[in-house]
Amino acid sequence: MPPPKSREILERYAKALGLADGSDEWLTFFDLAAVDQGMVPKDILDDQELAKALPAFFRTLRGQKPSTDELRKVAEKIRRGR
């Protein structure tokens, strides 16, 4: 059974499961719900820098190496603390 599309219903499920708002488990719960619906999680799309990194991420998942420039950008983002 696919997860509900409603954020409100997902929040009720997460709370019923005892997941703390903003915790790693909470974020994983919502990430898995989004992915199961074939969507990229909204918070990732809302972050312009992360959204720009998605093509390199998808290529990496397919086994294609990211370019040196793409790796530098990711490393810089990590250094800045996201």
Image: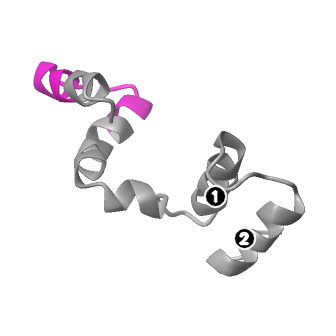
Residues 52 and 2: in front is 52
Which numbered circle lies on residue 49?
A: none
Which numbered circle lies on residue 30?
A: 1
Secondary structure type for disc 2: helix
Q: Amino acid at mark 1?
A: Phe
In the rendered view, would you say 18 is above or below 63? below
Q: Which residues are magenta?
A: 59-73
The residue under the point 32% across, 45% down is 54
In the rendered view, would you say 51 is above or below 64? below
Q: Amino acid at mark 2?
A: Leu
The residue under the point 16% across, 21% down is 72
Question: Could you tell me residue 17's position as x and y percent?
Answer: 88, 57
Task: Look at the image and say whether residue 67 sits in the magenta stretch.
Answer: yes
- Horizontal side of residue 27 vs 39, given as left or right: right
The residue under the point 70% across, 53% down is 29
Which numbered circle lies on residue 10?
A: 2
Residues 67 and 29: in front is 29
Q: Residues within 10 Å of mark 2 (few under 14, many from 20)?
A: some
Residues 67 and 12: in front is 12
The residue under the point 37% across, 40% down is 58
- Mark sitting earlier along the chain (2/1): 2
Secondary structure type for disc 1: helix
Q: Quadrant of the N terminus?
A: bottom right
- Horizontal side of residue 34 vs 80, given as left or right: right
Q: Quadrant of the C terminus?
A: top left
Which quadrant of the figure has residue 68?
Answer: top left
